[in-house]
Amino acid sequence: KNQVEQSPQSLIILEGKNCTLQCNYTVSPFSNLRWYKQDTGRGPVSLTIMTFSENTKSNGRYTATLDADTKQSSLHITASQLSDSASYICVVSAPNNNDMRFGAGTRLTVKP
Amino acid sequence: KAGVTQTPRYLIKTRGQQVTLSCSPISGHRSVSWYQQTPGQGLQFLFEYFSETQRNKGNFPGRFSGRQFSNSRSEMNVSTLELGDSALYLCASSWGFQGNEQFFGPGTRLTVL
């Protein structure tokens, strides 16, 4: 059973709208949680990294939140652009830094 | 600073053949990790090398192997290819261990016929 579950699997929104992607994990104990953006046919690019003590981190129009108590994270995208169309992957690491668990990703499509 | 580079970008092989993929990390990075990505399974960790030593290994058969050279460049080898090995193989480098921020290369798209 995957220890990192992402929802929704796919999402279609109109350009300019906001959206929120979810990541629930059962990895415990946990060291850090990352969000990656992956364009089709390309390697993932890091958006945010949060340790267990951080609640929120922003990177431009991307804002990630983390609730370590409920083991939930979200990625909020503001004022979406066509270039935001990509897969967004949540990755959770265990404290020994040798165990990374990947979510299956959310496929976001932004339409004009 | 140049990013992570992977060669070749695309590869077509037939069942039973073997393949070697190459990864050059960002200058100064000592850790290189390899991942397999397929539509059905998503990203799966293959192995990590740090200072020429394999530090961690994922749950893949022995047909998958790798090595790292003294300049931190890494190669991954897959022997006796199977149709199910068709995937995007990604390499990621980081300064320290796998848990540090990783920077991914563009990947090698392997198709097994």
Image (cartoon, grey):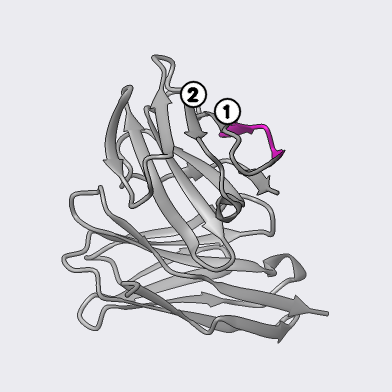
Quadrant of residue B49 within the rendered picture: top left
Q: Is residue B93 visible?
A: yes
Q: Is residue B49 above or below residue B38?
A: above
Confirm whether the magenta stretch covers residue A47: no
Quadrant of residue B15 within the rendered picture: top right
Amino acid marked by disc 1? Lys
Crowding at label 1, few (<14), some or many (≥20) Cα neighbours within 10 Å? few
Q: Tell me the magenta residue range.
A: B1-12
Q: Which residue is mark 1?
A: B1
| Quadrant, the N terminus of chain B | top right
Q: Which residue is mark 2?
A: B27
Report the mark closest to the observer, 2 or 1. 2
Kindly indicate whether the residue at mark 1 contacts the one at mark 2 (C-beta within 8 angstroms).
yes
Q: Position of residue A99 (x, y in %)?
A: 27, 53
**Both marks 2 and 1 on one chain:** yes
The residue at 65%/51% (across/down) is: A42
Amino acid marked by disc 2? Ser
Q: Is residue B43 above or below residue B1?
A: below
The disc numbered 2 marks a residue on which chain?
Answer: B
The residue at 60%/32% (across/down) is: B5
